[in-house]
Image: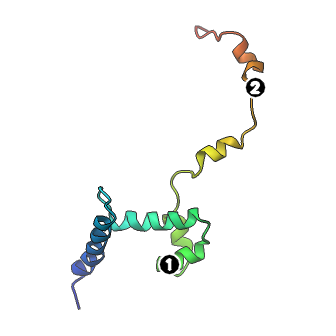
Amino acid sequence: MPSPQLLYLIPNKSLVKWVRRAKIDKYITWHSARLSFSILLQDKNVDLATVAALMGHTTTRYVSETYKRHRPKNQMEAITKLPDIELEKLSILEKPMDLNG
């Protein structure tokens, strides 16, 4: 049986090969690769149970807590959902703001 240190290095060596083959010019850790994998699946609306199973987890709890998106996706799409504002009708723009109090 290989040592725990060796078992840790095996996936990282594979990851290094994949990163080189993909011509990615930055340092990628195994954790960041798993996080990206999970986020890409979730962005495509893959359900959490499937994401958890693909990542080797038996429940969705760890995936929903650990492998979540840390920034909102589709920020411009979210902004376009806001109502249009006619700036010239806003009273705040009709007169200059007194910043001296």
User: Tag on residue 73?
Assistant: none
- Relative image position of residue 53 (x, y in whole percent): 52, 80
User: Where does residue 83 sit, x and y in percent of width and height?
Assistant: 75, 37
> On the picture, is 48 further left or further right than 14?
right
Query: How many numbered discs, if any?
Result: 2
Identify the residue shown where x is 74% and y is 19%.
88
Q: At numbered mark 2, what does the secondary structure look like: helix, strand or loop? A: loop
CB under 8 Å between discs 1 and 2: no
At x 32% / y 61%, what residue is drawn? 28
- Choose mark 1 or mark 2, whichever is in front: 2
* Lateral position of residue 11 relative to residue 42, left or right: left
- The chosen color scheme is rainbow
Q: Which residue is mark 2?
A: 86
For disc 1, the marked residue is 54
Q: Amino acid at mark 2?
A: Glu
- 78 w.r.t. 84: above or below: below
Q: Is residue 14 left or right of residue 51?
A: left
Q: Amino acid at mark 1?
A: Leu
- Please report the residue visible at 52 percent of the width from the left and 51 percent of the height from the top: 71
Q: In the figure, residue 90 lies in which quadrant? A: top right
